[in-house]
Image (cartoon, rainbow, N blue to C red):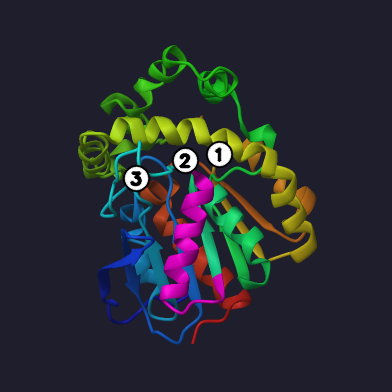
Amino acid sequence: MTYPTSIPVTHYRTAKVEDVNVFYREAGPTGAPLVLLLHGFPTSSHMFRNLIPLLADRYRVIAPDYPGFGGSDAPDHREFAYTFAHYADLVDGLLSHLGADRYAMYVMDYGAPVGYRLALKHPERVSALVVQNGNAYEEGLKAFWDPIKAYWREDTPERRNALAFLVAPETTKFQYVDGVADISRIDPDNWLHDQVLLDRPGNRDIQLDLFRDYGTNVPLYPRFQAFFRERKPPTLIVWGRNDSIFPADGAHPYLRDLTDAELHLLDTGHFALEDKLDVMAPMIRDFLDRNVGGR
């Protein structure tokens, strides 16, 4: 593959969707095939900052921040529904605002249920999938999820407060370095950046609301899987196999429903792009060029 001879400019924009300011990064030609990048927890579109210029010479790239993350508004959790259904509606609203009615999706972590809920709303709009440590199968919810599952079963203050460790600085760093062979490849600004945003007043409750609501995604797994089987979008799976949050147990089942999917297990952890961009970017560009066709 060849990279851009000049670096595409990324624009940092905000759009009003349902009276909420949604921040997003945008780059690339307006008329080119669109690639939608959907981030995970506890980060934002910041996780795609290095990938965007490597795609935007041939693709229109849009990477939004969900409310409560990154540069988007973070309304009080008592006045705003922090749910994955709501996030899917807001991303849908942003895409409508931008005139985008066809898109490939890169889904990671929280981005998977957001993107798959969006796919259920508009299955005909999904041109391709890039799946990176984003779950759609119960096999992928291992021991890491046990305290969160306990909260789903028993919504009490005790269960909720027991999850506070998930927004602590040591956990944020852990998500970036666990499973990585050479930690010197990981920019420490990642966890510092994320932690500053997690520590904003009120954000802990936002995240705890989302941990609770994640349980609403699991009953939708059969519908996500039916979408895979029925629509058969071209799919590239690039997965950090050492991830203890979404382990590779959740990668293999995709092949049951997406029999033509391309699966690559990489020797890295949860935030694979931070460690393996040099490996992943050529894979992603080649996949998109073959299946979506940039101009």
Q: Nearer the viewer, mark 3 or mark 2?
A: 3
- Indicate the quadrant where residue 60 lies: bottom left
Q: Which residue is mark 2?
A: 268
Percent position of residue 27, x then y:
34, 75
Work out whether mark 3 precedes mark 2 in sequence or the reverse, and give the earlier one: 3
- Residue 10 falls left or right of residue 228: left
- Residue 190 falls left or right of residue 29: left
Query: What is the crowding at mark 3: few (fewer than 14 residues within 10 Å), some, or many (at least 20)?
Result: many
Residue at the outermost front position = 79
Percent position of residue 182, x then y:
35, 38
Q: CA distance from mark 1 to mark 2?
A: 6 Å
Range drawn in magenta: 83-103
Residue type beneath disc 2: Thr
Percent position of residue 254, x then y:
71, 48
Q: Which residue is mark 3?
A: 43
Q: State whether the magenta stretch is mostly helix, strand or loop.
A: helix
What mark, if any, has residue 241 been given in the picture? 1
Q: Is residue 103 above or below residue 156?
A: below
Residue type beneath disc 1: Arg
Q: Is residue 30 above or below residue 12?
A: below
Tell me whether the residue at label 1 lies in contact with that at label 3, contact meaning CB atoms closer than 8 angstroms: no
Residue type beneath disc 3: Thr
- Indicate the quadrant where residue 262 lies: bottom right
Query: The residue tagged with tag 3: helix, strand or loop?
Result: loop
